[in-house]
Amino acid sequence: MPYLLGIDVGTTTCRCALFDLDGNEIAASYRESTTDFPRPLWAQIHPDHWWDLVRVVAREVVAQAPGPIAGLGLSGLMHAPVVLDADGRPVAPAQLWMDQRSAKQAAAITRELARGDGGRAIHTTVSASKLRWLSEEEPAAFARARHLMLPKDYVRYRLTGVVGTDRSDASGTGLWDRERGEWDWAAIEASRVPRALIPEARNAWESGGQVSEQAAAETGIPAGTPVAMGGADTLCTRIAAGPLAVGDACTYMGTATWIGVVGGHAADGSPIFRFGGATATTGAALRWVRDVFGASGDERAPSASYEALLEGVAEISPGADGLICLPHLMGERGPTPEPRARAAMIGLTLLHRRRHITRAVLEGTALQIRRLYDDRANGEVRCSVVGGGAARSDLWMQILADVTGVPVRTPRIVETSVLGAAMLGGVAAGLFSLDEAARRMVHPGRSFQPDETAHAVYNAIYRRYCELDAFLMPRYREEE
């Protein structure tokens, strides 16, 4: 029986998993990545760190493969541009999507595009502002640039030597015209990116080469294994989330949260997302609590440290005994982008312990997701279909259902990005179409219904949360 390998390069973890053609997980491994925070609101990772993690997790998974690996696919975090020199070496660390250092450049690009064609707003999340920052603040490094790609592309490049990107990652750069499905040359010029740097954008399921002999020696993946171009984590989650009806919110709760609300379906049955949005820190907020309070665990099983952190939290009643968390630990992306936003823990007393703070973070992230639902879909979400690491926690999923008043369901494989990556690998290897992969490999998981009593409590907390956020937001801007 052939098997499929998926690799997901995330913001806080690098994950590899092996699946059979029916979507059963055969083996999995992951490691947490180390983000460098050189200044407040700066966040960066050197691309070689991702490759080092891939080498470790891939070797552990491949060693458990009971049969041949027919294909490999890749998923990755978006908005973190990787710039290589002529020898294929990164010229600088990759600024993560949460990095806010390019606020000045984002504003400048927005002004210049507005003068040209009416334009659109560019925010610090996307690659455009980060690339202009690099060109202005580190011109010597940027002058050596020869290739532009995204994190999963760098891993593919190390695996196969193939440069380029896919259309899903290209669409999140701020350099892509989503309506026309092509590069936006006006935005590229405003971002100070040379045209020669712009990569070819292909479909995520197309061939991205084969594993080289050198990469095989480093990772244990057999040489010659077909590799898909790979896709953004958003694309991989959408294809691995299961069927989506009109009004469903495909919600990925990983380091951050992003949502896409289905407004209809195309002729081929694929969902059309009419509303979308993202927050800045979800799982990252919980990891911060874990790290601050020292709930440590084996590096081979970081999930154990989260289990220790969440122990007893369900015993704390909704509202965390008056504690409210505004989870803006790295600025905020939505509903309204505000790179200067900061987090706050409001209502602390001597009563509160780690369990209260943990619960307040779980609730605060859910309250921020409710703001996205209300702002982007007028509160008309009928169901939250949730993937990502947060979906492992029944408590967090129940809190999300109770806060939003919307039923929650999860797929059987909650790490949707790595499953979606494996599905892309199967398509690239010619084993099946993407539709057939979804029918065979994606299966339903658990469901959570809102508790009416808890929802009533959270309605009052939500009003207070919005009031506090509205009060504090102008104060962040005063710091400039």
Image (cartoon, rainbow, N blue to C red):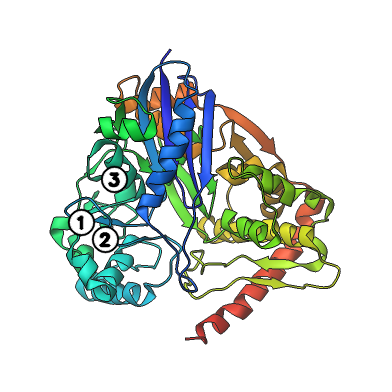
Estimate the x, y position of residue 115 in percent, counting from the top left. 22, 76
User: Marks 1 and 2: CB-CB under 8 Å?
Assistant: yes
Pick the front one: 441 or 186: 441
Q: Which residue is mark 3?
A: 167
Q: Is residue 217 above or below residue 295?
A: above
Q: Which residue appears farthest toward the left when viewing the image?
A: 196
Q: Which picture quadrant has residue 191?
A: bottom left
- In the depicted structure, whether residue 234 falls above or below residue 42: above
Which of discs 1 and 3 lies nearer the camera? The answer is: 1
Of residue 227 and residue 177, the one placed in the foreground of this image is 227
Q: Give the answer, above or below, for where 155 lies relative to 97.
A: above
What residue do we see at 50% from left, 37% from top?
A: 416
Measured from the top left, where is residue 327 in percent x and y? 61, 65
N-terminal-most mark, 1 or 3: 1
| Residue 91 marker | 2
The spot of residue 477 in percent (x, y) is: 50, 83
To which residue does mark 1 refer?
A: 85
> Viewer-proximal residue, 287 or 31?
31
Cα gap from disc 2 to disc 3, whole angstroms: 24 Å
Q: Amino acid at mark 3?
A: Arg
Position of residue 165 in the picture relative to residue 241 (left or right): left
